[in-house]
Amino acid sequence: MSGNSRKKKVELSGTLKQWLEPRIRLKLRHQKGLTNEQARVDIIKDTCIKILSPLPLNVFASAISRLAQIEEMDRLYLIERLLNITPNPDMVSGERANDLREFLVATLSPSNADASGATTIEIEPNLMEVAKSVLQQSHRDWIGTREALSTFLKECTAKFNTEKKVFMVYPHLSDISRKLFLEKEQRTSVEYFFACIQNVANSMGYKFKDLIRIEVPTRDQDKIQKLMSEFFPKGIKLEDDEDPNYNHKRRIRPPLLRPRWHNQQHMMLLALQNSPDYTLARGDLIDAAISLDEKLSAVTGLPRCFTGQTPRNSASACLTTNADKYFTVFKKDPNSHINYYKLSFIPNDLDDAINHYMRWMNDIIEHDWPLCFGKQKKLKTVQNSGHIVMLSVGAVSNPLHSRCRRCVAESSCDTKLPACGKCKSRGHLCIYPFRAGVYEKTERVKVKCSASPTSQTNQNQNGVVDTRPATATRNKKKLQQQIAEQQKRMESGDPDVCRASLPDEILDGLDLSNVPKSLDDVVEVRTSTIPNAGNGLFAKRNLPIGTPLGFYFGVPMMEDEFDERKDKVGKASHYSMRYKHTILDATDEKGEPFTKRDGPIFCPFHFMNEDPFGNMVFLEGSEVNQVICWTKRDIKKGEELFVYYGGDVDREHWGQAENSEQVACVGDSEEEEMEFSDENVTDEEDDEPIDKYEENGNAKNIDGNKVAGKKRKTPNKKQTSKKRTKRAASSNKRKKVIESEFGSEESLVAADDESMDYSVNMYDTPPKKKKAVKKR
Ligand SMILES: C[S@@+](CC[C@H](N)C(=O)[O-])C[C@H]1O[C@@H](n2cnc3c(N)ncnc32)[C@H](O)[C@@H]1O
């Protein structure tokens, strides 16, 4: 390298200049006061860090330490070599990024280094032990956390400890959790997780920071000190663990995790679910939900969901926002001002589920697959007609941001951007930039056609999508319009009223000869490559990144209902999936997945096995209960498709012989069943907050991606039945309150039921008149 560098010292190549100049200009614009040289050094450093950062910490550190040791011209030469691989090494992702990474590591590896030696970072095995111990206590899954830990390690900063002659690597919990998880709830829990690790480490006699160390050969200490402050600038202003005033306990505050069912949307859902025809007038629905909330709070000791001095207002806002899209708004009488709310799906109704599934499948096959699988005709220039074509399904929040179809071509999207930098769309993935150079103006996208009902988009009558974030006020204004549109759609009785069609000029620009026509053309089920994992799903052809292949079929039902009817039936728990407030039950009455290949609901995605770093991802669709099975990267013909199931899955018995896969559920035995009854719950247990053992409802997968639905946890024999007992107790109480509120058959019979006592005694009001019992 040094020989080459001398040559380059005289003159930078044209390619390098071309690459550097705009970046230097940009850098100088953002960071005033830098010299050209400083900017150049920064750009090279940032580029290498960006490429190398996914590597394990020790390889990463070794490579960048080597990078710091070589002369600047050598670094420039290195960049030039990268430019030979790809024109924009600082923007590249996916396979190409791997090539760059491999090249950099090989060039900067210790074997290529001078005799000065490389630095290694050692992660104490104890750290993993500590982490495991925390996991065992918290009953959270190891796979997700392993990923969280590795990301965590990458985000650490380092500082040299002169006394111990090692570099300590420090976590920056808030930074890390901000990057790992977007939502506040998850942020708190990851902080809590690391705080627990810290706590356990302390209790085991370790200083947390000592668990990760970088050993530095004595001769290199000065050099490495310099290097570290250059590459880990944050390392200089670290919080001081040695400070006697530092209180570890400060961080050990558990986040307030409510039970999954304890939120405003769920209260509304329960109220509607228990109403005739799943429908209520807005005012009645608000009353019912607030009343239910009051009673549940009183019984469970949880804070109210509808808070503040005006709970009606917060209930009203919840309906207006309709964040989880569980409700459809309509007017019974067009001249009346009363809005009615109806559940957007019929719980536990196979036919309704099939109808939705078939419509969605039809939409993606007809509308999305041509766009995804169609090849752009090379010589054809497509005229800009102003149409922007969206996929008919879209993730509510797009976790594939940096890898998504719309960004693939440009790699211009930052993973942290809330919406696409180009089209600003949040809901639907816009394939516009992928079909490069056709359209320029995308600030407000015009949607020619979208399969999604307009209630789920921000589309106005002119077909213009308002891409501003939704607010209650804006939603209020839209509400009238949506109602009118929905009314029209319902009246027309045509399910295909908003079926996807594509503008001709888009289709003209694409070679559609090889577009698949059915799932059979795309995937096949056969024995998995994982030993003892049963069947798996395989690609029958090359599948492009960012393609919605289909949906995870399931009959939506409430969790209680699933527990009651299906939980212990056959393999229902293995194949069911949690979606927000519902469970998607993917099995027939025997608890077997639907396998009739020519049947309307044969869903191959039920056979997708798990790999946390899989090539597929479950995404939340823009319609309720829509779980899209989406390609996370380009997939080659013959590859097995894998997806991450989410955190709430018990994997303990996987890979064992067939029979043992049928893990008996806790509660299967009589003995355990006993523990579900309220009598067995001690007062002490009752007092424990439920949130300690309820899962956080809004799951994220390991990529920080939104997981639409989580595979449900199969109850594990080893789980302490105490926990189940507590959960069952709280669930029983909840059920009783709901029954007393809405008058189910059982509660009508149980006139002296304790929950009836609650409603009378605690509120000092007579029990409500029972509503008609809905038969399903
Ligand atoms: C939704 S099913 C997947 C299809 C399943 N292999 C089959 O043949 O029906 C989920 C089940 O597949 C198995 N499985 C999935 N991923 C696995 C993995 N990585 N290792 C072992 N078994 C796995 C587990 O038994 C799990 O309960």
Image (cartoon, grey):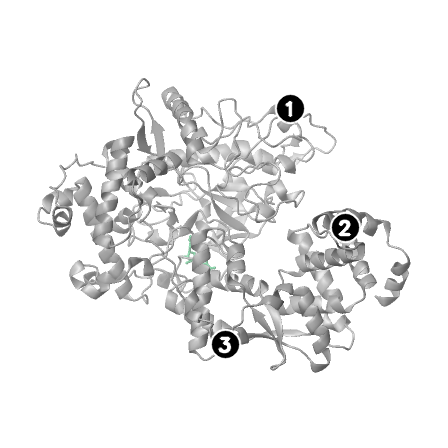
* Rendered image quadrant of residue 179: bottom right
Label 3's element? loop
Q: In which quarter of the image is the N terminus?
A: bottom right
Mark 2 is on which residue type?
Ile
* Labels 3 and 1: the sequence-earlier one: 3
Q: Position of residue 137 (x, y in %)?
A: 37, 68
The residue beneath circle 2 is: 24
Q: Which of 206 and 90 is in front in this view?
A: 206
Total numbered badges shown on the rendered structure: 3
Q: Position of residue 601 (x, y in %)?
A: 40, 39
Label 2's element? helix
| Left or right: 476 as drawn, with respect to 613 | left
* Labels 1 and 2: the sequence-earlier one: 2
Q: Label 3: few (<14), some or many (≥20) within 10 Å?
A: some
The residue beneath circle 1 is: 385
Tell me whether circle 3 and circle 1 mark residues in contact (CB < 8 Å): no
Give the residue displayed 32% in from the left and 39% down from the top.
315
Identify whether 457 is placed above or below 729: above
| Left or right: 358 as drawn, with respect to 175 | left
Q: Nearer the viewer, residue 549 or 571?
A: 549
Give the residue displayed 75% in from the left and 55% down from the top.
34
Q: Where is residue 101 in the image (x, y as percent from the top left)?
A: 69, 59
Mark 3 is on which residue type?
Lys
Q: Quote the CA–CA distance across marks 3 and 1.
A: 64 Å
The residue beneath circle 3 is: 207
| Left or right: 481 as drawn, with respect to 30 | left
